[in-house]
Amino acid sequence: MRLTDKLPDKLPRVAPDGLPAAVLLSFLATAGLFYVNIMAALVTGLSDGLGIKPASAGLIASANVYGAAVGALAAVFLIRRIPWRVAATAALLGLIAIDLVSTRVVSVPWLTALRACHGIVGGLLVGVAFAVIARTRSPDRVFGMLLVVQFGIGGIGLWALPPLVPHYGTAILFLALAAFSLATLAMLPFLPAYPVATESGVTAAPAPIARRPLAATLAAIFLFQAGNMGLAAFIIGLGRNAGLSQDFIGPTLAAANWLGALGSILVVAMGARFGRAKPILGSIAVTLLFTAAFWRSDLAVVYVAANIGSAIVWAFTIPYLLGLAAAFDKVGRTAALGGFCSKLGLASGPLLTGLLLDRGGYSLTIGAAVLLLLLSGLAAAWPARLLDRAAPSQD
């Protein structure tokens, strides 16, 4: 007992607000939701590997993310009651176990229930990670690094996993998720403590913001994620429906994910130097243009440009939206709420798209995505401007 108490103190810890800490925190947050970054490969792999309809595959994926929303909401209430490192360790071990069990399940109802459980555990992990990120000096930059990790590794998954499903079945998808969680578990001891700032501490908590701006921020996060993921989850099918081959679609999506990281890198460099209203509203406007371009996916060059462009602005916008939620307090409760609404949107998007595909095809799903993104911009405008007026810009 005494040895295990002393061992963590002898391990090197990264600086709390340095680049290595941002990378490690990004892996921690990504581990709980990595399946979202390979959602297109997961949905298509489930459909092809299990021989089920897109709506059923979308249901399994949505159950995973709805579970994550429940877990993220639970994190809001557990953050101050359970040491974050203990909670993260338990969650990572739980994720690995559930992913390994998932490799043996082929029944849609059982797999749906199992992935919902996976989502709950993963959502708890993401909520804990978001709360810790909120305790850093510049949450926007850490969220930017988070998207760099997600898009970079997600691009590898989208490129490598779909061709493996015909040979190894859907098990390869869940083994990839388990491997990522295992790698993250090995990184966990190197993170610093990130204690909660107390009223007498050096770092004072920011003044509370009214509930209505907070609600508008959470609505913006939900709508933005639902609009983007609703289309992204079925982007492989969209390309196939437009007459494009899998050999063309796979590298396109991988390149889009890798290039999408440029948006996050820009956030890391900018921080809140220009406030949040201008970056958020400007990038959502650009997202609308690239999303609308998917109506001409029959043109290969448009499909490529729309994927790359939407990936870059997605990776640029969401760190600012999550940073907006995190700015409401330094304990991490509102950051966890932002994570909850993000998961809720990520889950609702594919579910809505799966239903629309059965009724109106891909054209209708693109229109729905455009509408959701427009509403997101309208919801974000007020709280972003309010916060910009209340707080000075950061370097």
Image: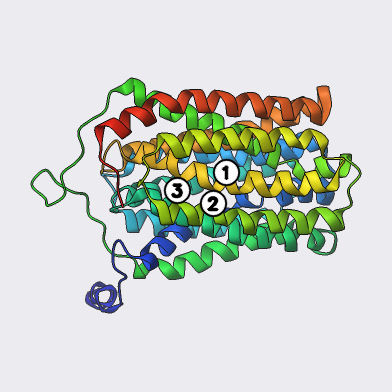
Task: State whether residue 284 is above or below residue 163.
Answer: above
Q: How is the image coloured?
A: rainbow
State which mark lies toward you, 1 or 2. Answer: 2
**Residue at the image point whose x is 15% and y is 44% from the top:** 204
Q: Secondary structure at mark 2?
A: helix
- Cα gap from disc 3 to disc 1, whole angstroms: 19 Å
The furthest residue to the left = 200
Q: Nearer the viewer, residue 377 or 216?
A: 377
Residue 253: x %, y % from top left: 73, 53
Q: Residues within 10 Å of mark 2 (few under 14, many from 20)?
A: many
Q: Secondary structure at mark 1?
A: helix
Q: Nearer the viewer, residue 94 or 221?
A: 221
Task: State whether residue 216 is above or below residue 237.
Answer: above
Tell me if I can see residue 124 in this picture: yes
- Cα gap from disc 1 to disc 2, whole angstroms: 8 Å
To which residue does mark 2 refer?
263
Q: What type is the residue that disc 3 sits on?
A: Val
Tell me if I can see residue 73 in this picture: no
Residue 131: x %, y % from top left: 34, 47
Q: Is residue 194 left or right of residue 312?
A: left
**Residue at the image point whose x is 60% and y is 37% from the top:** 286
